[in-house]
Image (cartoon, grey):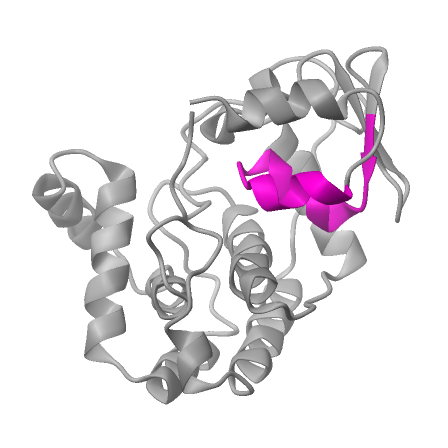
Amino acid sequence: MWSGCAPTFSATHLPAPGATGRAPGSSPPEPTVSDLAAERRSLGAFLRDLSADEWEAHSLCEGWTVRDVVAHLTTTTRTGTLAMVAGMLRARGDFHRMTRDRARRVARAYDPTTLIDRLEETADSDRRMPGSAAMDPLLDILVHGQDIARPLGRHRPMPAAPARAALAFAADNPFYDAPARFAGLTLVATDGDWTRPDGPDEVRGNTADLLLVATGRTAGLQALSGPGVAALTRRLTRP
């Protein structure tokens, strides 16, 4: 089961066939640079309100602090092919270890204010990690915003249309084990016009919680309802 922190680099994993919450053969709407820029700037403003203790608090990602997660978000527009290859060699081919180790190095190198500045400096950038899909940077910052906010007891709303596009992308992406996790379940977003039909047992919830579950976060489970929640919980929490 996928248990890393950084939901990126999924383009090399082909979507599973079947229901996708959209018309067969279609794709989720492509994110725009303005959607991504707005979310980066919004997160930057959110981060400027955090205390020193909150920066060092645990995120939803096991073993990652809030500071580590922010540091990771500053690397995705600054990682080229050579850096990716070198990092993978150091991590002995483990992508998640490479991502974690680089985030921690950056977190140690920069104070919180500088990390926010680095995030905002590249708000309008369309650069992304080598091999990643166009949707990945937007998915990354939407989910990591929740990874940061929820353990701190802070509310961070997701923009509706970008969040639905990210959910449609993640729900059929084997990188997150999502197709197996959602097999036989029909997902229904209660805050928007989105469903993913795949069986008789419904799982209902808002887009943000469904997106967290799609990317392997158990924090999204408690707000979900429907007869499929028990099966989904078992699949997401099994060793």
Residue depicted at x 46% and y 29%: 175
Prevailing SS of the magenta stretch: helix
Considering only vertical position in the picture, is 15 above or below 75? above
Asked if the stretch drawn in magenta spans residue 212, the answer is yes
Considering only vertical position in the picture, is 75 above or below 118? above
Residue 237, horizontal then vertical, whole percent: 53, 28
From which residue to which does the magenta span run?
A: 203-223
Query: As drawn, is 206 to the left or to the right of 167?
Result: right
Considering only vertical position in the picture, is 229 above or below 144? above
Residue 39, horizontal then vertical, whole percent: 62, 69
Asked if the stretch drawn in magenta spans residue 177, the answer is no
Residue depicted at x 42% and y 25%: 1
Residue depicted at x 51% and y 83%: 50
Give residue 83's quadrant in the image: bottom left
Residue 134, horizontal then vertical, whole percent: 53, 47
Quarter containing the C terminus: top left
Q: Between residues 36 and 32, which one lies in front from this camera angle?
A: 36
Tell me if residue 210 can be seen. Answer: no
Tell me if residue 90 can be seen. Answer: yes
Considering only vertical position in the picture, is 155 above or below 189? below
Residue 231, horizontal then vertical, whole percent: 68, 18
Give residue 108's quadrant in the image: bottom left
Tally of numbered tags: 0
Query: As drawn, is 48 to the left or to the right of 27?
Result: left
Q: Between residues 90 and 108, which one lies in front from this camera angle?
A: 108
